[in-house]
Image: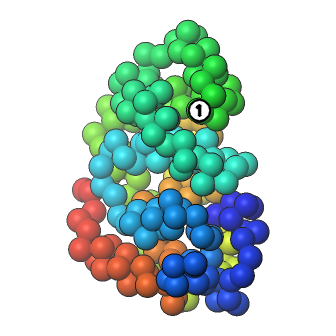
């Protein structure tokens, strides 16, 4: 979670928040309908597709220093601008494409993040040649239950240090030349794509995500 999300008020001590629609949720999605929909239908659901995991990791890199809702509301524009996050196409982007992306007012126009996304598409090709599956690579870092907290708390989700598995994956990616993939970014991927269930106790989605994770077939 980022600082803008942490500043949302009117939460209980447990980190829950009853929205204007009367539904209790994790505090960070506030009352924005699109954010609530993301919380209810996407966040924490386990994902095993290479393309979706790659897209989310790239978008998490763009989030660095910003609120996720900023990226969420630009996601469709990002998809169009980055060829649907097809890494094979992105890997061929050149300086003209960088200029095009920097000139697009619908994007986050940060040269370092744009160049990192293109670099990571090229590194994605290398990683797939090495491992055969990005999903398999990512899911090998799923935190083991024994090292997960017995109870997920607001304080832990808000500001807890990334677990060793997130630090290990970030280190493995950086060793392969990936950029903007620090431990916080990687752990945000874990939270969003179901490698952990960080919906808080009392949030109705926690049980749903737990059931989805139990039924999910890990890539091998």
Q: Residues within 10 Å of mark 1 (few under 14, many from 20)?
A: some
Task: Label 1, secondary structure: give it.
Answer: loop
Up-down: is 158 above or below 12?
above
Residue 181 percent across, percent down from the top left: 59, 44
Q: Residue furthest front?
A: 20
Residue 48 percent across, percent down from the top left: 30, 55
Residue for point 64% across, 22% down: 102
The quadrant holding residue 47 is bottom left
- The quadrant of the picture occupied by the C terminus is bottom left
Circle 1 residue = 106
Is 183 displayed left or right of 217 in the figure?
right
Residue for point 68% across, 89% down: 12
Whether residue 215 is visible, yes or no, is yes
Whether residue 190 is visible, yes or no, is no
Residue for point 68% across, 72% down: 158
In the image, 140 versus 21, the foreground residue is: 21
Up-down: is 24 above or below 164?
below
Q: How many marks?
A: 1
Is 145 displayed left or right of 136 in the figure?
right
Up-down: is 48 above or below 82?
below
Residue 5 percent across, percent down from the top left: 68, 65
Residue for point 55% across, 9% down: 96
């Amino acid at each position: 979670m980022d600082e803008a999300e942490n500043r949302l008020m009117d939460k209980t001590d447990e980190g829950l928040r009853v929205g204007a629609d009367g539904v209790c949720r994790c505090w960070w999605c506030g009352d924005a309908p699109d954010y609530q929909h993301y919380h209810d239908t996407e966040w924490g659901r386990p994902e095993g597709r290479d393309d979706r995991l790659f897209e989310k990791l790239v978008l998490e890199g763009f989030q660095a220093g910003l609120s996720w809702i900023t990226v969420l509301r630009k996601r469709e524009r990002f998809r169009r601008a980055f060829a649907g996050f097809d890494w094979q196409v992105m890997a061929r982007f050149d300086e003209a494409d960088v200029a095009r992306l920097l000139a697009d007012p619908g994007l986050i126009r940060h040269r370092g993040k744009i160049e990192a996304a293109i670099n990571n598409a090229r590194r994605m090709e290398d990683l797939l040649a090495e491992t055969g599956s990005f999903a398999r690579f990512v899911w090998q870092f799923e935190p083991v239950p024994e090292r997960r907290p017995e109870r997920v708390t607001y304080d832990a989700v808000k500001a807890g240090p990334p677990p060793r598995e997130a630090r290990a994956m970030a280190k493995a990616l950086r060793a392969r030349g990936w950029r903007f993939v620090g431990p916080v970014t990687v752990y945000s991927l874990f939270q969003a794509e179901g490698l952990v269930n960080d919906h808080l106790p009392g949030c109705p989605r926690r049980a749903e995500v737990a059931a989805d994770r139990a039924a999910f077939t890990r890539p091998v």
